[in-house]
Image: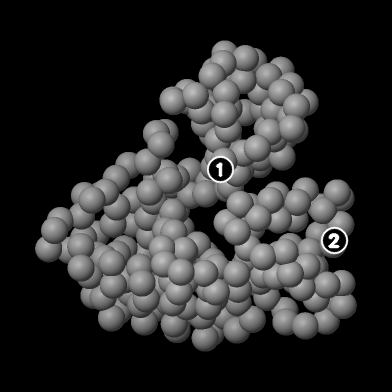
Amino acid sequence: MGRAYQNRKVSMAKTSDAKAKVYSKYGREIYVCAKSGGVDPAGNLALRGLIERAKKDQVPTHVIEKAIEKAKGGGGEDFAPARYEGFGPGGCMVIVDCLTDNPNRTFGDVRQCFTKTKCKIGTQGVVSHMFDHAAILVFKNNDEDAVLEALLNADVDVTDVESEDGKITVFTPQADYFKAKQALTDSFGEIDFEVDEIQFVPRSVTAISDDDMPMFEKFLDMLNDLDDVQNVYHDAEF
């Protein structure tokens, strides 16, 4: 599957000016996760993993606590996930994941990003079949065989295990995310995961020419400027 996945999930924190948007996006996602699955991280594994990722991305504690407190109230915004797919500059395939309280507004905003950069938004499923929805875990370890054995003994459906520079990268289907994490911690103790996410990983790549790069960067910047956009995935190779 390859390590290039890390370059194909668009970073939301390229500059210090973008940090406020990162905090807002995490706050919204934590709120939705806590409201739907419970505010106790011990009983809501998805929330626990999300909080861990937020801390790694240097989201302040008060932002996390505010989102959880908001979820405890039971009221507030009613956000729902929305996913849009299409073809970006140079014909690359793009998936845009959102959390929205107004689907019509969000669709219009995302569609405008496509149309203003001469791209084409499609129907659901138009490109996602060319991506694997994978859980990705990266941590310090150099015993690939031991990691693979621990996962297989726990009946985890392992897609791939890679070892490079003293780090192990584990790919599993997203449905086995929690099982994989539990199997690894049971076997190796508490692990400080450097990457702990569920992502869309492209099965192939689309080369982006120098001529298409300015439009591609504009396209990504426009999407990242939208408050409702949580993640952008693509298969572009530069």
Left or right of 78? Residue 16 is left
Relative vertical location of residue 72 with respect to residue 12 in this rendering, above or below? below
Q: Position of residue 24 (x, y in %)?
A: 60, 73
Q: Nearer the viewer, mark 1 or mark 2?
A: 1
Q: Residues within 10 Å of mark 2 (few under 14, many from 20)?
A: some
Q: Quadrant of the N terminus?
A: top left
Residue 220 seen from this side: yes
Per the rendering, the mark at residue 38 is 2
Q: Position of residue 134 (x, y in %)?
A: 54, 42
**Helix, strand or loop status at disc 2:** loop
Q: Which amino acid does the dot numbered 2 rest on?
A: Gly
Mark 1 / mark 2, whichever is N-terminal:
2
- Viewer-closest of 24 and 104: 24
Q: Residue at x 57, y 41 (%)?
A: 194
Q: Residue at x 60, y 44 (%)?
A: 196
Q: CA distance from mark 1 to mark 2?
A: 24 Å
Mark 1 touches mark 2? (CB < 8 Å) = no
Residue 130 seen from this side: no
Q: Which amino acid does the dot numbered 1 rest on?
A: Val
Left or right of 74? Residue 145 is left
Q: Which residue is mark 1?
A: 195
Per the rendering, the mark at residue 7 is none
Q: Position of residue 141 (x, y in %)?
A: 57, 23
Q: Residue at x 53, y 84 (%)?
A: 104
Q: Position of residue 224 (x, y in %)?
A: 43, 71
